[in-house]
Structure formats: C-alpha cells, structure tokens
Amino acid sequence: MNLKRKSGILLHPTSLPASAGIGTIGCPAFDFVDWLSASGTKLWQVLPLGPTGYGDSPYQPFSAFALNPLLIDFEDLVERGWTEKNEIVPPDYIKTEGNVDFGSVVWWKNGVLKKIALKLLDGGLKGLKSEFENFCKENDFWLDDFACFMSIKSHYDEEGMWNKAWPEELRLYQKNAVDLWEKSHEDEILTTKLIQFFAFTQWNALHEYAKSKNVEIIGDIPIFVSADSADVWANQKYFQLKENGESRVVAGVPPDYFSPTGQLWGNPLYDWKKIAEDGFKWWILRIKNILKLVDYVRIDHFRGFDSYWAVKSGSKTAEKGKWLKGPGVALFKAVKNELGELPLIAEDLGEITDSVRRLRDKCGLPGMKIIQFGFDCAEEKKGSLVNAFLPHNFFNANCVAYTGTHDNDTTQGMLNSLCEENLCLIASYLEGRKVGFSEACAMRSDGNLCRKLVSLCFSSTASFALVPMQDLYGFGSDCRMNTPGSACANWSWRMRSDMLYGELASKKCEWLKELNCLYNR
C-alpha cells in the first residue's frame, strides 16, 4: 500500500474535553474533526475502541468487535429522542474537566445506559425496532456471543474470570447451556445489544462527518485479545488453552528498552494451525469489522505474525520464553483475497529481525518510525548518525513517522529526562551546528526543542506524519498516556477545553496549518 503525503494527530476519544467524566464521540469529537479540517490536517489516529475492563486498557477489551459504551454521548441520545435530559444528569463527583476517573465513570455511565436501554425496550423502541433488528442481524457473528458473555459475566464476575468461576457447561461454551442462558436472560442480553447499537450509530455518524471534512481515521487492532473476553470464550479452539479454558502459554516480549524483565502481557496465544484450517475466517471478520469503522488500521505488534514470544502461564516475568512461528504471509494473503487491498500500517517496533522486515515488505505494508528512538543511544559512524529512526535515514517514504506513541513518554517529558550528552546531540541535530549544554537547556526549557521535533516529523520524507496531541502542546511526563509494565495511572489523560476551544486552540490550529502548507501535507 502506497500512502499519500498527509499529517495527523494521535488522540484517543476518551481524551477529548468538555463532557461529563470522559471524552465521548459526541459534540467535542465533531468539533475536533472541524479543528483538524481547519488546520489542513487529514488524519486522526485513535487507540482500540473496544469495551475496556480491569486496568482500563484499550488493548485488553472484553471484545475485539464491540465498541466501548463509555464513549457514548448522552447529549446525542437526548437529541435523537432516545432519552430525556433529566435522565442523564451526572452526580456531583463526575467532573467535566481533568483526567478520567474510570471507576466513577463506569459506575455512573453504565448504570444510566442500562436504564435508557431498558426504557426503550419497554416502550417498543420508539420506531427504532427495524433499525435495531437490522443492526443485530448484520453483526450477529460477534454480537450474540458478546451480549451473552457480558450477561454471564455480570452474574459470576465477583468470583473470578470465566475460565475459573463459571459452571463447566457455560465455561466450555456448550451450545445447549448457552442457548438456555440466552432464553432465560433475554432482556439483559437485548440491553447490551441496544447499548452497542447506540455506540455504533454514534461512531458511524462521526466517521461519515469526518469523511465529509476530508479527515480520515486510523484505527488500531491489538494482535492479541484479552483472556477475559467473549472472543476467547466463544472461540476456544483458536487458542492454546488447557481443557478447562486456562492458557497454556501467554503473550509478552523479552527484555527490551521498555523493561529489563520483558513485558508479560498475559494474553492467550493463538493456535494458528486451527485458525488456518478454517481459512483464517475469524481474522478476516475482525479486519472486515474494523474497516467499516475506520479508513486505515494500525496493527499492533506486527512482528508477532512472523514469530511471537510464548511464556509459560504462571510466570512472574517475560524473561523466560521461546519464539514460535506465526502465520506469516498466509494470513495476509487470505485477508487480501477476501477484502482486497489492505489499508494497514505495521507496528514494526521492538526486536525486529530481517524475517519480520521481509514479511512487512511482502505484505506491502508501511512501517513506523519513532523520532524519539532516533536519539536513544544513537549510533555513530565516522561522525555521522546512522540510527534508522532519524529522518535523514528514512530511505523509503512509504512509512509513518511519529514524534512518539501512546507507549512513550511525551516528547517534552523525554527531553526533560535526557543527560547532557543526548540533549546536546538533539539540539545540534535540530540546529545543524554544535550546540552547548547551556544553550540546549534553554531551548528545552522554552519548548523550542519540542516544537522543532514536531516540525522535523512533518518535514520528513515519511508519507504520514503523526504527532500525539500532548506533543503538539509541548506537555511533560504528567500527560503521558501509558507506561508499559505499569498497571496503574494509565490511559486517563484528558485535554483541557482551551486546547480545543478559544485563543490557544486557534493558535495551534494556525501553526498546524503552516506546517501542513510548508511541508506539503
């Protein structure tokens, strides 16, 4: 896939301002699209959109197909006539500004959504019956299992995960037992389906609006799925599980620049042989589903399709494991045969081998270049910097450049943490001359280095240039989105309203417009 030269902003919808408790896909999301459009910025990258569970990570959703109910905008439901204004008033502990407090938002918002859905169902759906039934029919390949899973989970969740706490006949997904549960919990299951209908209706409206403003959305597919998900429960043959549903081996990566003990993600690993025997049907459906929602898809941990790190279940760290072969090019050929040309971006970071690079290139996928990594122990050869993440070494324009990602510190935060040698190196690189420590410190303190790194990303030969919203505003480490290996204080950063509305937002919009014009994006 060859990309046309464009720029974009990385911002998850939960980080949008001016709504109760958490960013939504309502009015602020439409305003953000307008802001992007006014600046000539043509791409909006989001994180995975699925329903989050423990830890609030979008990379550990209860379903690889469903949308997160917390993104539903209550004001939009009122405008559509699906609820009343007095039914959506937030309690005093729900704030409209500041970081997301997921616990309070989940407690309040999920309860309100269930009341709205039940009231609509009791009232015959107020003219929505046909539209809702069509939605259920079009999505029955995942929606039935997801709604049933969430229903059973709500009854047994306090006792542990599905593969530990559920009765054996439900744990093993025995059809008779699942059918009986669905019949005896029909209202509860319909409620979950209707809430998904709300979410998909709103997201589709936002996506269409973005298209009308010449803004395309880049989505994100985590390679692995959560152990506590409808995906694993309903498709156990596709995973390396024990007879009781527990994982034999789990996902992670060996020690790297993020962690000296590796990263132990804990996701169940695929049985690629079984998936291949079924013509990769589950993966084809997964990619087809997300391509209805977005225009491009970033595939997280692409190297896992070549080979993946398998760690014995129960291990404390990811240090001890082994590399096992993934499906390779066969998966992507199957998906391409079914869906045509694939607008995919390969997250080819971490321990990347020649074999991974060959797979990426065989599939014709652009990879990622993280400019922050270019100055991390930059290699020198006869006085020249040869690090592949530095823009002068982007030998192939068919790639996507970032200042940083959701897993990195913010660019200003990274600059604040640098030693004298690396800080001077960055300043010298950006200035095209040798810069001393005192001058480099001054450039760091006034935000000049961060701004220059954003400009560097835009000026690069990479077809797509993407910058996290935090980097555009030069925010420090306190605005970081995620710290890999840390289980708390992640995913909660939220913009202030003045970053989207008012004089400050207008100034950033104008700067973006200048960069896009100057660098032909």
Image (spheres, rainbow, N blue to C red):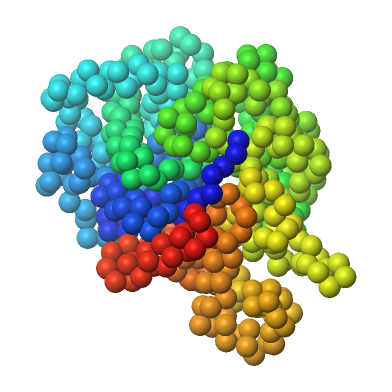
Q: Residue at x 48, y 70 (%)?
A: 475
The residue lying toward the viewer, choosing from 311 and 14, is 14
Q: Quadrant of residue 485?
A: bottom right
Q: With respect to residue 441, does 31 lie above or below?
A: above
Instruction: Residue 310: give x, y in percent of width and height.
Output: 74, 37
The residue lying toward the viewer, choosing from 294 and 517, is 517
Q: Residue furthest right?
A: 382
Q: Residue furthest top?
A: 176
> From where the camera sits, is residue 38 visible?
yes
Lateral position of residue 472 relative to residue 358, left or right: left
Q: Quadrant of residue 257?
A: bottom right
Q: Residue at x 51, y 13 (%)?
A: 174
> From where the camera sits, is residue 299 visible?
no
Instruction: Residue 295: give x, y in percent of width and height.
Output: 46, 37
Instruction: Residue 426: give x, y in percent of width and height.
Output: 67, 74
Instruction: Residue 151: give x, y in percent of width and height.
Output: 38, 28
Q: Residue at x 56, y 42 (%)?
A: 3
Q: Residue at x 38, y 58 (%)?
A: 39
